[in-house]
Image (spheres, rainbow, N blue to C red):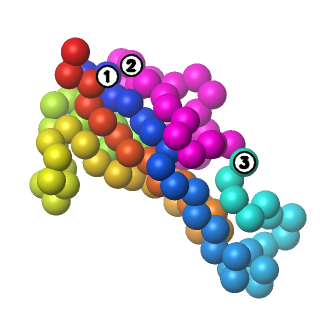
């Protein structure tokens, strides 16, 4: 089994949806910073990682950790995944660590 590095690559904001439907919603997720990295060991959620985001990206982490690849991604051992917060999703780059 391989470790997997998670890197925060983008934080989005659907301000129009927040304005129309949100109540006390920050415009971007405050839990992550772009460039922040986490390491997944033994398929365990990294300390300090958002449990909601983990639930969304865990299946992709498992594929990489078990040596699989995503067919529509050019680079083997890499994929992109995101949390499903419709107001302010966060995009993560997942990379299998081959060491």
Rendering coords of residue 36 (x, y %): 55, 36
Q: Is residue 40 left or right of residue 63?
A: right
Quarter of the figure with residue 95: top left
Residue at the disc numbered 1: 3
Q: Is residue 94 left or right of residue 10?
A: left
Given the current orientation, which residue lies at the most extreme right position? 24
Rendering coords of residue 43 (x, y %): 37, 25
Residue nearest the viewer, comparing 65 with 32: 32
- Pointer 2 local density, CA inside 10 Å: few below 14, some 14–19, many at least 20: some
Given the current orientation, which residue lies at the most extreme top position? 99
Rendering coords of residue 99 (x, y %): 22, 15
- Pointer 3 local density, CA inside 10 Å: few below 14, some 14–19, many at least 20: few
Determine whether the residue tagged by mark 2 lies in a helix, strand or loop. Answer: loop
Residue at the disc numbered 2: 41
Q: Is residue 24 magenta?
A: no
Residue at the disc numbered 3: 30
Nearer-N-terminus badge (3/1): 1
Q: Is residue 23 left or right of residue 84?
A: right
Q: Which residues are magenta?
A: 31-55
């Amino acid at each position: 089994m391989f470790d997997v590095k998670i890197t925060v690559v983008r934080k989005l904001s659907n301000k129009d949806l927040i304005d129309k439907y949100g109540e006390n919603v920050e415009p971007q997720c405050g839990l992550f910073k772009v460039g922040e990295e986490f390491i997944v060991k033994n398929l365990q959620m990294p300390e300090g990682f958002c449990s909601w985001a983990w639930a969304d990206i865990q299946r992709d982490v498992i594929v990489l950790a078990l040596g699989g690849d995503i067919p529509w991604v050019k680079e083997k051992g890499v994929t992109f995944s995101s949390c499903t917060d419709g107001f302010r999703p966060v995009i993560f780059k997942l990379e299998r660590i081959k060491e």
